Amino acid sequence: QVQLVESGGGLVQAGDSLRLVCAASGRSFSSYTAGWFRQPPGKYREFVAAIIGGGGAVLDYTDSVKGRFTISRDFAKNTVYLQMNNLKPEDTGVYYCAGAKLYYNYRRAFSYDYWGQGTQVTVSS
């Protein structure tokens, strides 16, 4: 069983930075694909970034965050990070960390087996 706990969200101004942290319990998480998703107000949950287990290669980012967000993981700490720079108001939403046993369809929420409770990110203009 894997449990995920996100932290690091908050209220910031446009152009600021935040680093989200996803702390995982369960040794098996190191082999899981890890993803970050977000749910803007009144919208569906959407893919943000994903990183593979094992070697830790980054899989992909959604186009709107490329060049601004960086996903990474620390296997020793069983933790996944999302560094968010140059934040924009459209980045506002609840950010979720997720873990998937397989990496196929990593952009799809249904591919993930475990989810955190989410952390709120609000970017003011």
Image (spheres, helix red, strand yellow):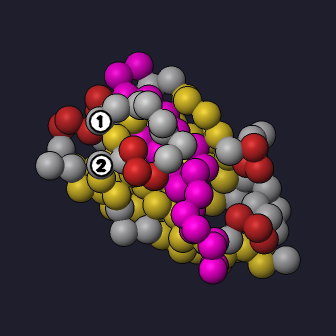
Q: Is residue 2 above or below residue 59?
A: below
**Does dot 2 land on a helix, a strand or a loop?**
loop
Q: Please tell me the numbered disc located at residue 113.
A: 2
Residue that protrudes farthest toward the left in the picture: 1
Counting every numbered tag in the picture gives 2
Q: Is residue 103 above or below residue 77?
A: above
Residue 44 can be seen in this image? yes
Which residue is found at the position 29% from the left and 36% from the top? 101
Q: Is residue 99 left or right of residue 26?
A: right
Indicate whether residue 38 is drawn in magenta: yes
Q: Is residue 124 above or below residue 2?
A: below
> Residue 61: x percent and y percent?
65, 40
Which residue is found at the position 60% from the left and 50% from the top? 48
Q: In this picture, which residue range is highlighted in magenta?
A: 34-55
Q: Is residue 32 left or right of residue 92?
A: left
Give the amino acid type for the residue marked by disc 2 in the picture.
Answer: Asp
Q: Are marks 1 and 2 in contact (CB under 8 Å)?
A: yes
Indicate whether residue 2 is drawn in magenta: no
User: Quick one: label 1, few (<14), some, or many (20+) residues within 10 Å?
Assistant: some
Q: Is residue 18 above or below residue 67?
A: below
